[in-house]
Amino acid sequence: IFKVPDFKLPTVNGEVTPAQFKGKVVYVDFWASWCKPCKKSFPWLNQLQKKYKDQGLVVLAINLDKEKHLADKFLEKIPANFVVAFDPEASSAKSFKVQGMPSSYLADRDGYVTGKHTGFREKDTAALDQGVARLLQQ
């Protein structure tokens, strides 16, 4: 368990920082346009955001492409109904110690990371969903 590292990243609607999500459960997902499993994870992340938004979940996807147009092209094909931030320098990924793509981190309402998951496989989604539901009930 560790505190969500501080960062300030651009989104299409201004900037995003962890402080904005105080009191929310945050699912932080690191991704890149070249990541094949990310193509499968985005539709699931959209469902997750829709299912738990009213209970206080925020899905935050942090893109690590060096060239933003590659991320934009990905998002044209697979739209995201959640917050997408851009970190071409990958400084946030370094502070989270990301080791693979995609990597996701689940943070509780107090801003502590309580769970980490590398990769994306359909068979893992039920357990990931339960982890989110459990934190939302706390």
Image (cartoon, grey):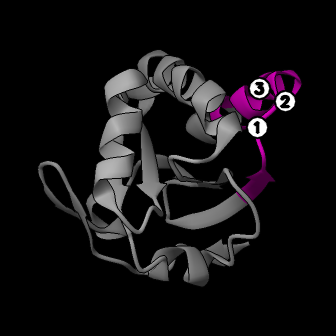
Kindly check if marks 3 and 2 are in contact, taking CB atoms under 8 A apart as contact. Answer: yes
Q: Is residue 108 left or right of residue 115?
A: left
Amino acid at circle 2? Asp
Q: Residue at x 76, y 37 (%)?
A: 120
Q: Is residue 104 left or right of residue 65?
A: right
Q: What is the x, y in percent for residue 94?
A: 59, 82
Q: What is the x, y in percent for residue 38?
A: 61, 37
Nearest-to-viewer mark from 3 and 1: 1
Pointer 2: what residue?
A: 124
Q: Is residue 65 left or right of residue 97?
A: left
Closer-to-camera residue (94/110): 94
Nearest-to-viewer mark from 2 and 1: 1
Amino acid at circle 1? Phe
Say what secondary structure mark 2 lies in: helix
Residue placed farthest to the left in the image?
Answer: 14
Q: In the image, which residues are magenta? A: 115-133
Pointer 1: what residue?
A: 120
Magenta stretch, overall SS = helix
Q: Earlier in the sequence, mark 3 or mark 1?
A: 1
Kindly check if marks 2 and 1 are in contact, taking CB atoms under 8 A apart as contact. Answer: yes
Q: Is residue 83 visible?
A: yes
Q: Is residue 24 above or below residue 93?
A: above
Pointer 3: what residue?
A: 125
Quadrant (top left/top right/bottom left/bottom right) for the N terminus: bottom right
Q: Is residue 127 magenta?
A: yes
